[in-house]
Amino acid sequence: MSEPTTSIPLRPTGRRGPPEQQMQGHWLLATLGKRVLRPGGLALTRRLLQAAAPGAGDRIVEFGPGVGRTATVLLAAEPTTYVAVDPNPEGSAALTAVLARHPQARLEVRDAADTGLPTGQADLVVGEAMLSMHDQKTKDSIVAEAARLLGPGGRYAIHELERIEDAGTRSGAPVGGPGDPVSREISRTIKVGARPLTLQGWQTLLEAHGLEIVWTAHAPMRLLEPTRVFADEGVIGATRFFVNVARNKPARERVLAMRKSFRDNRAQLGAIAIVARRRA
Ligand SMILES: C[S@@+](CC[C@H](N)C(=O)[O-])C[C@H]1O[C@@H](n2cnc3c(N)ncnc32)[C@H](O)[C@@H]1O
């Protein structure tokens, strides 16, 4: 049975101009009907979850579930418990509609850096497209919290933006750190921090918190390419999304600007998925 689709409303941002021009990019896409808001799409999520192997008996925590698309996949594994942790209200109605049919699932309106959940009581923590939004200090706090929640051998599965250092990277320009020009440009168009790390940067971050990398995969960052939208949302969902974009001029301008900056930076930007295990 498919999960319910609850659309999320446009919210005034308090800034001047139409909300479509001001909202954080992922929430604008969600108001237009998009449910998959991570860089490697549903295909990379499926590979990640195959590697992390959620199963019956697992106690799962998901950081930053958005509108609940991955929650649907995780709950299909019938875990013992599923706790979504997200401090932001935008996706909560859609997420709550997904969780409503699963008595073992609940939402904690908390920051992933401080979940209030008990130590060592999770078997699997999942987070997609949420660490990349934050600066290094906050990334550290969130990963430390994931490590605290996991028992020894517990899995932490992440799917994030990868900063690729290629021949076109200007020599001397910072890569995947403060002042990275790619990060600055993407952040400006999506109107939220985009702070991807290199493969080495993600590995170092996880290992610094007692996590051992056991699996890694990469995919192109094609979030707004039509083929990817159809793959992620299905024919009906993708058609609805493109119709909504076509009907709304400020939203269309914004989506096209986001897609252009992703295309312009495609050699420097990818998606990465990692499963790490908490050391004993
Ligand atoms: C780009 S969306 C990704 C949503 C979903 N994971 C997906 O991939 O489709 C980022 C999500 O992370 C959440 N988020 C951002 N910072 C967070 C934090 N410190 N703790 C928990 N969730 C956070 C946002 O509210 C949002 O749900």
Image: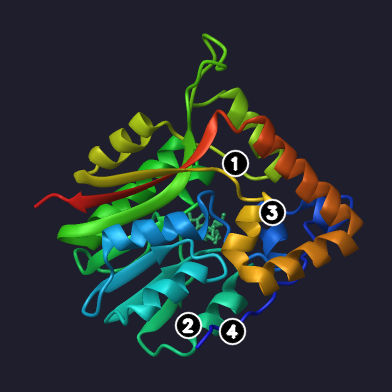
Which picture quadrant has residue 264? top right
Crowding near the residue tagged with mark 1, few <14, some 14–19, many ≥20 C-alpha atoms within 10 Å? some
Cα–Cα span, label 4 and label 1: 30 Å
Report the amino acid beneath label 1: Gly
Q: Position of residue 8 (x, y in %)?
A: 70, 72
Judged from the image, the secondary structure of the residue bearing numbered disc 3 is helix
Report the amino acid beneath label 3: Pro
Cα–Cα span, label 3 and label 2: 29 Å
Judged from the image, the secondary structure of the residue bearing numbered disc 1 is loop
Question: Which is more N-terminal, label 1 or label 2?
Answer: 2
Q: Is residue 15 visible?
A: no
Q: Position of residue 82 (x, y in %)?
A: 35, 76
Crowding near the residue tagged with mark 4, few <14, some 14–19, many ≥20 C-alpha atoms within 10 Å? some
Cα–Cα span, label 3 and label 4: 23 Å
Cα–Cα span, label 2 and label 4: 10 Å
Report the amino acid beneath label 2: Leu
Q: Residue beneath label 2, please? A: 99
Nearest to the observer: residue 195 or residue 200:
200
Asked if ligand 1 lies within 8 A of label 3, the reply is: no
Residue depth check, mark 3 versus mark 4: number of the one nearer the observer: 3
- 158 vs 59: above or below: above
Task: Please tell me the numbered disc located at residue 4.
Answer: 4
Q: Residue at x 19, y 44 (%)?
A: 212
Q: Position of residue 61 (x, y in %)?
A: 34, 68
